[in-house]
Image: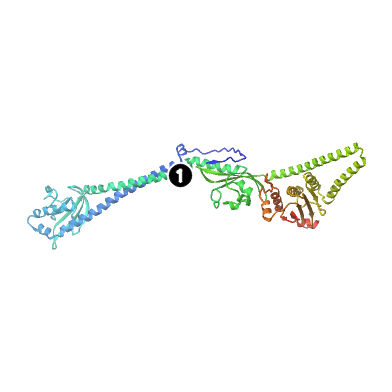
Amino acid sequence: MRRHNVTPVTLVFITFTHEPRDFLTSRVSLARQVLILQLAVLAVVIVAAAGLAILDARHDSDQATRRQVTGIAVSLAVAESTKAALLSPDPTAVLQPETEQIRKATGMDFIVVMAPDRTRYTHTNTDQIGKAFSGNIDRALHGETFTETYTGSLGPSIRSVTPVYAGDKLVGLVSAGVTRERIGAQVAQGLPAIIGVAAAGLAGAAVGSFLLSRRLRRQTLGMAPAELRTLYEHHDAVLHSIGEGLVVFGNRASDPADVVNDEARRLLDLPDGDVRRADLPDSLRELPSGTVRGEMHVTPTRVLVVNQDPVEWEGRSIGSVLTIRDRTELQGVLGELDSIRGFAESLRSQAHESANRLHTVITMVELGRYDAAVEFATAELALSQNLIDRLMASVHEPALAALLLGKVNQAAERGVELTVSDDTALESPHPLTTHEAVTLIGNLLDNATDVALQSDDKWVEVTVQQTDSQLLVRVADSGPGMSPEAFERATGRGYSTKSDHRGLGLALIVQLVARHDGAIRAEQAPAAVAVTIPRPRAERSTS
């Protein structure tokens, strides 16, 4: 099975201890073992069936012979010519030619007509005429017709004995029989057909078993049962031990995933049991087919890095593999780093501006323009101090005040006028933490500044207010605004209006807002994004 490389690489070292196994069974593939077992079972079944068929044919032949010898003996016994011959002075002269003719026509081995005292009047072997009949005749002497298997002068045979009556007088007995040798020969004639059918059945069964074995070999990759067991144990252990989420889907979207490990269920908040694509977060359901590398996806509780690789076997696609890594904590650290970087950039820009102003003042002094230098320095100082004083008076959280001041300077350096509305008033960012408030306001301002740069009149205005019931953050800009459809896409995974990269700003904001049961909406005329966070009742009562 060929897979594309999946990054990053996770190394897992696993040690297993197995019970000793039989060498032969551990080396012979499962398909080969199944083939041997099937052939052995089929051979036994077919040979047993053939044996039963032969026994059944012999039994049927015996039964047919019994009916035949009985019919011939009875027919000859009731014939008037037989009775007349038995009453004549020389029964042999009359009966011997007649019985031989009947014997040859019917396939009997012998037909014996005898006196009640066992004296033979007829026999296939003329030397036996006049001698005593060897066999049981007691039941026939009492008027009963019966058959038996008896070893007589011609060997073992199936014979029938029946009485001959002239009126009420017993005048003789008739016995007709077929030797076992002849019956065996008749059965032997049918043996080739039975053996042929058995051989054809065995050959067909062997071909079917071979084809099944080939299919099983392809499905098990020619591995022995012990290898399959070891593979399963390793596979299961790896799935439960790796720190990445793993989800394997087949080609049919409606089918459940073939593999879902514990980490994937944790990261995606998946329920126990079967998992289908419809159970995944919205952005993961819409993943394109083919290879996906390092896409950022935001769920209501996590930031995830997702890779997707197609799985191919013998040149055809059989599914896809999703690997998922948790980047929530890393994203939080990056957010803090961005805040610190923003503060650093603000300080840098302020230092740059201060240096420019200082050089200007020094130059004016060198030129003897003392009054102009004092006026210029005083005006710049008053303007900067006025903004600082207003922010510190209206925003009592130092980190947020520093963030707003830094963003004003950053925006000015980029050519965007960022203003803090006069009605901004914030005692505390609760229910948000300071870090969450910095993330929320900082991302909104960064997005608005990027949008404003694309317009002719470059401005951004931010309002932060805290009422008894909620916290409101509203950022307006000079951009064209977003339609409801565009805003819905923007709140999804990795959306960005910038062509050079894909961002997470709005998606992270939506995640933060959802965590506090807040609301986010887009406004137009002017374009703005407003976020409201409800305050808990306990806070309302104390405020």
**Residue found at the far bottom of this picture:** 167
Q: Is residue 212 above or below residue 534?
A: above
Residue receiving disc 1: 216
Report helix, strand or loop for mark 1: helix
Q: Residue at x 68, y 51 (%)?
A: 490
Question: Left or right: 463 with respect to 505?
Answer: right
Quadrant of residue 207 in the image?
top left
In this view of the protein, which residue sits in the foreground, 160 or 472? 472
Instruction: Give the color scheme: rainbow, by chain, secondary structure or one colour.
Output: rainbow
In this view of the protein, which residue sits in the foreground, 288 or 396? 288
Q: Residue at x 29, y 49 (%)?
A: 55
Question: Left or right: 422 with respect to 150?
Answer: right
Quadrant of residue 146 in the image?
bottom left
**How many neighbours does mark 1 have within 10 angstroms: few (below 14), some (14-19), or many (20 or more)?**
some
Question: Left or right: 39 with respect to 110?
Answer: right
In this view of the protein, which residue sits in the foreground, 396 or 199? 396
Q: Quadrant of the C terminus?
A: bottom right
Q: What percent of the width, then of the height, locates residue 486?
A: 67, 53
User: Could one spot residue 417 in this view of the protein?
Assistant: yes
Quadrant of residue 374 in the image?
top right
Q: Amino acid at mark 1?
A: Leu
Q: What percent of the width, then of the height, locates residue 137?
A: 18, 54
In this view of the protein, which residue sits in the foreground, 417 or 528? 417
